Amino acid sequence: MTFIKTLAATTALAGILLAGAAQAADVKIALVAKSLGNGFFDAAHKGAEEAAKQIGGVQIIYTGPTTTTAEGQIDVINALISQKVDAIAISANDKDAVAPVLKKAMGRGIKVISWDSAVAPAGRMLHLNPSSNALIGNMCLKLAADALPGGKGEVAILSATATSTNQNTWIAEMKKQLPSYPGLTIVATVYGDDLSDKSYRETQGLLQTHPEVKVIIAPTSVGIVAAAQAVKDAGKIGQVFVTGLGLPSEMAGAVHSGATKSFAIWNPIDLGYSATYLADDLVKGAKAGDGAELPIGRMGKVKLDAGSEAAMADPFVYDKTNVDEFAKVF
Ligand code: RAM
């Protein structure tokens, strides 16, 4: 009896000690969005929480500015440095403007990675692309050509901010690969800053100044929804098609209205999940660099290239046959 009691007491004490140790060992990983209130980043956050739970002893701090500005992100990063987080995983509004403060963070021992929208190499240890940039650029052009009879017509681009690394890279890829789509001409690029109302107004402007435009490519999940709504409100369904990158949960209405025939995206939950694993790998001592292979939980592993970058899966296409099914997921 005494023995059992002692054992129980010892076990309880060990439990308390372990709990204390686990708390002290908590790894704090900040997932920094371009801005809060964007469904794409909310989905990535979901993946980050899933990874944290699987790894154990990891706390996710999901944060970001209220608008898609570098200044807003710099304030957020300074606060995270004061909070002494272990890692920062950021999708950058401007690759150069956030680099100095992230360098400061690394100087204080914080591991810094970028994902989705890259930080310049000096301001991060590695970057995780959702997919190959060339593939995303080609996908946007293919979707535009698919929406047009004979793949022929004028195209305009509605982007996010003018400094956004990922959109700028994809637009550059589209321009580079345009010769493979001889029927398409890009006549304008405008910026909606990943704000619904600005994206809507910019689309209205495009429809007015370029009445010959047949397809709007919006490589942004915020812009694509607003553009589809503007086309619908202008009574131009069937004359102007909207495509690009969007979330099935936000685009189902546009597909059913006919404003969008098809669009693409990768899995944002998997992206947030993988970014969290990579940040944790670095906190636990893994080294980033050319050829490094880092584990990312249920997603397997990624291999970094010479620029310490890696890319995940191919984008997936959604249309009226599958949009409702995926709308339940992200
Ligand atoms: C918006 C953001 C994000 C981009 C997606 C497709 O949510 O600009 O960075 O990856 O669109």
Image (spheres, grey):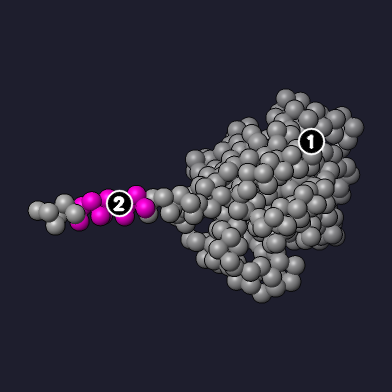
Q: How many numbered markers are drawn?
A: 2
Residue 231 location, x and y as percent?
74, 31
The answer to whether residue 213 shows anywhere in this view is no
From the image, tell me which residue sits under label 1: 192
* Residue 172 quadrant: bottom right
Residue 145 location, x and y as percent?
75, 51
- The nearer-to-camera label among 2 and 1 is 2
> Which element carries disc 1, helix, strand or loop?
loop
Q: Residues within 10 Å of mark 2 (few under 14, many from 20)?
A: few
Name the side, left or right, on which 186 lies relative to 322. Answer: right
**Overall secondary structure of the magenta stretch?**
helix
Range of magenta residues:
7-17
* Residue 107 quadrant: bottom right
Q: Residue at image x 60%, y 33%?
A: 253
The answer to whether residue 301 shows anywhere in this view is yes
Task: Give whichever of 295, 260 is nearer the camera.
Answer: 295
Task: Give whichever of 137, 257 is nearer the camera.
Answer: 137
Could you tell me the amino acid type at mark 1?
Gly
Residue 212 location, x and y as percent?
86, 37
Could you tell me the amino acid type at mark 2?
Leu
Q: Residue at image x 70%, y 33%?
A: 66
Q: Earlier in the sequence, mark 2 or mark 1?
A: 2
Compared with 226, 124 (above or below) is below
Tell me how far mark 2 sits from mark 1, CA to CA: 57 Å
Q: Residue at image x 23%, y 51%?
A: 9
From the image, tell me which residue sits under label 2: 13
* Residue 308 quadrant: bottom right
Magenta residue check for 266: no
Q: Residue at image x 74%, y 48%?
A: 92
Residue 188 location, x and y as percent?
88, 42
